[in-house]
């Protein structure tokens, strides 16, 4: 395997994150730093990585939310056709009403900017970098169309009050949309 193939493998293993690459595969990160892939190569790799994430999206229904988060992270790097990939993500999200409530809540949080700043969430990405806002509003409305009760609580950290987590996630989505959405200001 040549150096470029080793670098690409490390890039893919770490979801395109040089931070994770430096931490998890420091030798390959050093190669990456020496080689310094050009922007066209990185665009190509991100497109391949997105294709891979979409092909894996439904492999594990309990981790669909994780793949959505990975896709948004890749798109936020700005090397891919955001409009195309965001539209494709929203097409998949239209099918997510079949997911369990906990997965839906995490996806709503991810769209708001879960575990990151709001300007790294799906709402910001879609409203600021694509023409998919109308579609996102429709898809998110459908995704958030459920309710929780005490029976949804599970004995896992962060899920002992699922009703509250659901309400907070919806509130965070609404806050992010109010900040970045263009349709709501017309």
Image: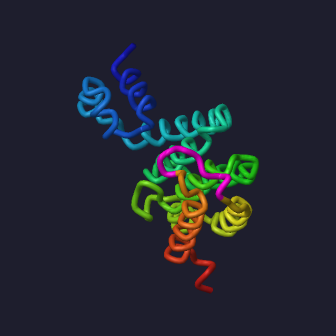
Question: Who's the residue at 61% across and 61% down the image?
Answer: 163
Magenta residues? 150-158
Q: Is residue 101 magenta?
A: no
- Identify which residue is drawn at 58% across, 33% down: 52
Closest to the observer, 105 or 53: 105
**Image-quadrant location for residue 123:** bottom right
Kindly identify the residue that appears in the image at 72 percent across and 61 percent down.
146
Q: Is residue 140 above or below residue 155?
A: below
Residue 120: x, y in percent? 44, 59
Left or right: 117 as drawn, with respect to 64 = left
Indicate whether 5 appears above or below 110: above
**Residue closest to the eye, 160 or 176:** 160
- Magenta span main SS: loop
The foreground one among 42 and 97 is 97
The x and y percentages for residue 29 are 28, 30
Residue at the extreme top of the image, as rendered: 1
In depth, the one of 48 and 52 nearer the eye is: 52
Quadrant where the N terminus is found in the figure: top left
Q: Is residue 157 above or below residue 162?
A: above
Question: Could you say where residue 122 lies in the image, as x and y percent from the top left?
Answer: 54, 59
Q: Quadrant of the C terminus?
A: bottom right
Image-based side of 85 in relation to 12, left or right: right
Return the x and y of residue 88 as percentages of the image width and height: 67, 50
């Amino acid at each position: 395997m040549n150096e470029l193939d080793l670098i690409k493998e490390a890039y893919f293993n770490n979801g395109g994150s040089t931070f994770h690459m430096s931490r998890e595969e420091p030798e390959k990160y050093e190669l990456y730093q020496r080689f310094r892939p050009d922007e066209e190569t990185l665009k190509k790799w991100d497109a391949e990585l997105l294709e891979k994430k979409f092909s894996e999206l439904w492999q594990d229904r309990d981790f669909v939310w994780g793949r959505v988060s990975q896709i948004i992270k890749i798109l936020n790097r700005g090397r891919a056709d955001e409009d195309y990939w965001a539209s494709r993500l929203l097409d998949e999200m239209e099918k997510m009403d079949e997911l369990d409530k906990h997965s839906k809540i995490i996806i709503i949080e991810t769209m708001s900017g879960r575990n990151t700043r709001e300007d790294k969430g799906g709402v910001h990405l879609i409203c600021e970098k694509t023409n998919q806002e109308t579609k996102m509003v429709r898809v998110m409305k459908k995704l958030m169309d459920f309710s929780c009760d005490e029976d949804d609580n599970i004995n896992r950290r962060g899920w002992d009050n699922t009703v509250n987590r659901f309400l907070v996630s919806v509130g965070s989505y609404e806050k992010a949309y109010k900040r970045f959405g263009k349709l709501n200001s017309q």
